[in-house]
Image: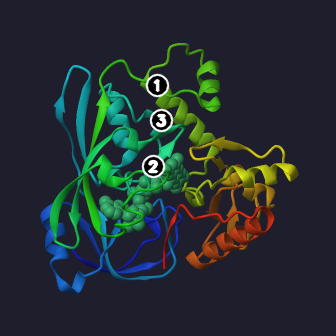
Amino acid sequence: MNLKENISLKELNSFGIDVKASNYLYVQTIDTLKEVLDQDRFKDPFILSGGSNLLLMNDLDRLVIHMGLKGIEVLDETNDEVFVKAMAGEVWHEFVLWCIEHHYGGLENLSLIPGYVGSAPIQNIGAYGVEQGACFNSCEVLDRETNELVTLSKKDCEFGYRDSIFKSKHKNRYIITSVIYKLQKNNHKLHIDYGAIQTVLKVKGIKNPNIKDVSEAVIQIRSEKLPNPKELGNSGSFFKNPIIDKDLLDTLQKTYPEIPHYTQENNQVKLAAGWLIEKAGFKGQRKGNVGSHHKQALVLVNHGNATGKEVYEFAMEIIKKVQEQFAITLEPEVRIIK
Ligand SMILES: Cc1cc2nc3c(=O)[nH]c(=O)nc-3n(C[C@H](O)[C@H](O)[C@H](O)COP(=O)(O)OP(=O)(O)OC[C@H]3O[C@@H](n4cnc5c(N)ncnc54)[C@H](O)[C@@H]3O)c2cc1C
């Protein structure tokens, strides 16, 4: 076991926050994972994957297990579908590219989302009208309570908008070791309704797109719109898009008739958190080392050597102002680790 001590996590979280882990272990086998969890001194380890959905507030005085389980394999297939198992430590975007290379459709809209495969189910990652839950078949997890491997079905995971049991009722109970996706081998069902995807395909003169075209369009849009964490530290969207009752929308529309909204079930609507933050005056604003991105207000950025506390305080200021102005409480999408 190559256990390290007093390791900086600056390069291992996309916000680039410089905190230290008292103990750090890159884990490449399930046996090692089980062995570690069996030891009393490592009772409450922190699982780190790509570090792209985190705000680290303090040094972590506990073991950080960096997920290094690798491997992709086809488990089963029919004429139309294929079941692909990817280990938790595979880089998500590389896995998506592997699927496209093998002509397996379903995940192409999720190209270029940072992070590892094992974290994708946690907040049910989504982009451009698709969530990973749409292709998710099952996942294997290590139950911290028993140190046994268990298989969880799609139903067990209770996927919602940026949500699952891994963020709510079973938060921190399971360590995801692998995920199985059910993908389409042919007759790919494309999701190209988003205006931005349509525009890119049109500009490129693509009339009958395939999954690779959609992936490339998404990569282009994302590269133009979102800051690259390697150049400007960030964790993508800091807040979730709020879902509110239609009654509140009716009230808000009296002052803001142009407010963007998307109809949901049960007489509810989803609003764009980025729009609310922009209207609250934060877009492109900088406070010390922290700011809201000039192209996408929802993305908070580390302009230099920001601490987790500085980012947190800026986020709280945004929540307060949006609450005062719109009577809506923004909820962080990013996991805040105190
Ligand atoms: C530029 C940018 C753009 C982004 N765009 C999107 C987007 O379009 N859509 C979207 O949904 N998200 C987006 N995100 C957020 C992020 O990419 C996803 O949430 C991603 O799934 C996080 O993966 P990760 O491996 O980096 O997780 P980490 O940040 O390492 O971990 C996140 C949480 O999951 C826990 N965890 C990690 N791995 C495991 C595991 N194997 N088992 C159990 N718990 C685990 C960690 O302890 C932590 O609490 C974006 C982020 C960035 C920086």
> According to the image, label 1 marks what residue?
190
Residue 8 spot, x, y in % from top left:
42, 75
Residue 245 spot, x, y in % from top left:
66, 53
Question: Distance from label 3 to label 1 (Cα)?
Answer: 9 Å
Residue 121 spot, x, y in % from top left:
37, 52
- Contact between marks 1 and 2 (CB within 8 A): the answer is no
Eye-nearest disc, 3 or 1: 1
Indicate left or right for 227 with 112 as reference. right
Q: Quadrant of the N terminus?
A: bottom left
Question: Distance from label 1 to label 2 (Cα)?
Answer: 18 Å
Q: Which amino acid does label 3 sit on?
A: Asn
Q: In which quarter of the image is residue 26?
A: bottom left
First in residue order: circle 2 vs circle 3: 3
Above/below status of 236 relative to 332: above
Query: Is residue 275 visible in the rendered structure shown here?
Result: no
> According to the image, label 2 marks what residue?
125
Query: Is residue 161 visible in the rendered structure shown here?
Result: yes
Taking the spot 47% from the left edge, 78% from the top edge, the residue there is 19
Above/below status of 18 relative to 330: below
Taking the spot 19% from the left edge, 85% from the top edge, the residue there is 40
Helix, strand or loop status at disc 1: loop
> According to the image, label 3 marks what residue?
109
Q: Which amino acid does label 2 sit on?
A: Ile
Mark 2 close to ligand 1, CB under 8 Å: yes
